[in-house]
Amino acid sequence: TEPGLVFSERQFKAIVDAVHARGLMAETHSTTPEGMYIALVSGIDLIQHPEVGGVPITNEVLKLLSEKRPFCSIHGNNHAGRGYQMALARAGANRTGGASAASAASNGPTELRSWPKPAMTEKMIEDSIRTTNSRVMRANAEQIVKTSCPITTATDNQVAQAIEFSRDPNQWGMRQPGVGTLAAIEALVEFGMTPSQAIVAGTRTGAQ
């Protein structure tokens, strides 16, 4: 379901039914409200980061999450804790047209060479909206943890790039392996879960 509507509802249900016929769980990577709706009515078993839609989640989708109860893997390490504070600092710097040394440093790695920037594609524009809309994603996550769907963590952890080519070896900040997972679990508490619920989400529910 990324970046737009890749499948119709009929096509999506055919895929889910085929996966279920093999006794497997059907998962989706959802980034649009309508795409998540299609996944839910088609019987999806797990949704990766249902809060990342770029727009406020609808009551209709929240109701379906409680009724269908798919696993909801929330990618909270970038819109909670230090990652969220860094995003707010970047947003403030962008609004004022300047940036402090601290917020500039958190904006990504120092480039050793200036490369030409390609023209923005539709997908690049959509990605930009999502990555700069931390407040919406955080608010969506707060709504999702109130539903009946079992919560797990989705981190997008990665090593980023070879450290010998950058002054900042981890350009993705809170997605560093290990630390990113802990940040994602801690984020669930910021979103409204109790510490015990967050630990269960990151362990038993994740294993399920």
Image (cartoon, rainbow, N blue to C red):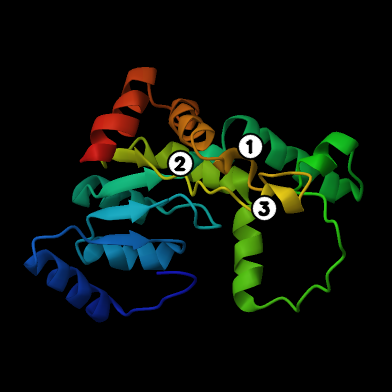
Look at the numbered disc 2 and give the secondary structure of its residue.
Answer: helix
Furthest residue to the front? 164
Q: Which amino acid does the dot numbered 2 rest on?
A: Ala
The tag on residue 19 is none
Q: Secondary structure at mark 3?
A: loop
For the residue marked with disc 1, what is the amino acid? Tyr
Q: Which residue is mark 2?
A: 141
Task: Relative to 128, say whether 74 is above or below.
Answer: above
Q: Residue at x 81, y 39 (%)?
A: 103
Res 31 seen here: yes
113 shown above or below 159? below
Of labels 3 and 1, earlier in sequence is 1
Q: Characterize the local packing of mark 2: few (<14), some (14-19) or many (20 or more) Cα atoms within 10 angstroms.
A: many
Amino acid type at image mark 3: Thr
Relative height, residue 198 to residue 124 (above, below): above
Looking at the image, which residue is at 22% across and 47% down? 69
Q: Quadrant of residue 101?
A: top right
Secondary structure beneath disc 1? helix
> In the image, which disc is placed on residue 132?
3
Q: Which residue is mark 1?
A: 84
Q: Residue at x 24, y 38 (%)?
A: 207
